[in-house]
Image (spheres, rainbow, N blue to C red):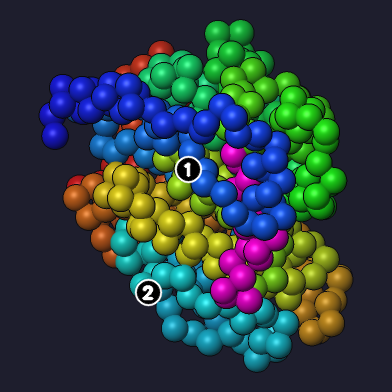
Amino acid sequence: MSPKQKSKQHLKTLSNEETRPASTSRRKFVQNSLLYGSGVLTIPSYLKGGNRLFSTSRRKVNHVVLCLFAGGIRNFESLEQREGNLMPNTLIGDHSIHSSIASGIDTMPLPCSIPIASQGVLFDKFRYDSPITLHYNAHASILTGRYIHDIELMKPAPHPTLFEMYRKHHALRSNHSNTWWVCDQGGPFPFLRSSSDTQYGHAYAANMIQPSSLANSPLLQHTLPKNEEQLAMELRRQLLGSSLEQPHSLSKASWLDLLHDFGKAYHRGIWKEDSVRLNDDMLNIFASCLILERYTPELLVVNMQDSDIGHSNFTSYCNNMHKADYALGKLWSTIQENDTLRDDTVLIVLPEFGRNAGHNSVIDAYGRYAVDHTGDDVSKQSFCLIAGPQHIVHQGQTAQMDGEVIDIVPTIAHLLGFEDKVHPLNLPGKVLYEAFV
């Protein structure tokens, strides 16, 4: 389909927008949906389809999902599989789980029929080349494309983030469903949705949600506020946290629709068919799947942090890696099952850094020592997996080139067609061209 035809189709979709009858009470609709899992869900078509008006020949794809497999993931347990293949949905390998920890690892199904790595390029010589292996610094470095050594907690980054670059230079800024940051609740991570750079900043921030904040929310316990306005405000507070305003919020109707999706799944049992025990990482990925299905955004970034328990419990660290891998499998399956996303989405997965070669003095119930990340060379080693359709991404290959975490922003700018727009920023990273056909 030509760009001209796409534009005409987009305008036709806008003119045929579906709406819920005015007589329907949205609050009753949300309550009934939460209590009984019933009701028909409709939203404006332009929120479903994303921004096709900015599809250009410079783009390689129209959708990128970046997953920060965070918390500190050591190559010993991931790529080298010294404890067995803890990530069978993500990485190729048939090593069974080491007997010393096997009983502490949850049995998980395989959402992916083949590993994601077989559908992409694995960069196994990847580094976080900074002396400071702190999570917020590393996240900020990845999302700004610059190593940031002196950032203060609970403050925005000093340089523009990927979200701001994209929204300013290449996205329809009024389309609030197009750019998402799905992150852990509390702490500094919400501040990464925009920077303090005066040329970018709050006006170009990502749409942000913190799914784990909903887990014990009254909104999911049927004690809903009395009116629609109060309900929408409470939902925003629960999803966004109390520390930040949302400058480009979805409409009130869309917030309620999002609550409907999450609440219905929560009460039916999230991924109930697989009998899995959820953690916060899995909630983040589940919410990301809902967002992908509903809005098909062009840029979605999600972080997972539960593996950071490795400081105090090695077996739980391995188990959370295993759970996160399952969630990644569900994420990839969601992309593959969606007609809009399947052949038009690139998934990028990377830990922000690794862990030390040696252990600390904390022993878990399985006799295994915990592991910190204090800046030795092994803690700076990582990997990056870029997966996507075969006409865009090479399949089942291992890259020869080295890579760094600061290469992610230039690579996504290349994929989404705004690489030339960020040249004046003089980003130090490079495009990971070896991944692409």
The residue type indicated by label 2 comes to Ser
Tag 1's secondary structure?
A: helix
Residue segment shown in magenta: 257-275
Note whether residue 254 is visible: yes
**Residue 183 vertical placement versus 413 (above, below):** below
Outermost residue toward the bottom? 99
**Residue 112 vertical placement versus 229 (above, below):** below
Residue pictured at 80% horizontal, 50% vertical? 222
Q: Main secondary structure of the magenta part?
A: helix
Q: Nearer the viewer, mark 2 or mark 1?
A: 1
- Label 1 CA crowd tier, 10 Å (few <14, some 14–19, many 20+): many
Percent across and percent down for residue 32 are: 68, 49
The residue type indicated by label 1 comes to Arg
Query: Magenta stretch containing residue 27, yes or no?
Result: no
Quarter of the image with the N terminus is top left
Tag 2's secondary structure?
A: loop
CA gap between label 2 and label 1 equals 24 Å
Residue pictured at 38% horizontal, 20% vertical? 170
Q: Which residue is mark 2?
A: 113
Apparent side of residue 67 relative to residue 133 in the rendered image (left or right): left
- Label 2 CA crowd tier, 10 Å (few <14, some 14–19, many 20+): few
Question: Could you tell which of marks 2 and 1 lies nearer the N-terminus?
Answer: 2
Q: Which residue is mark 1?
A: 294
Residue pictured at 66% horizontal, 34% vertical? 25
**Residue 291 vertical placement versus 397 (above, below):** above
Apparent side of residue 189 relative to residue 407 in the rendered image (left or right): right
Outermost residue toward the top? 198
Percent across and percent down for residue 387 are: 35, 54
Percent across and percent down for residue 245 are: 73, 21
**Residue 259 vertical placement versus 265 (above, below):** above
Apparent side of residue 79 relative to residue 5 in the rendered image (left or right): right
Q: How many numbered dots are placed on residues in this image?
A: 2
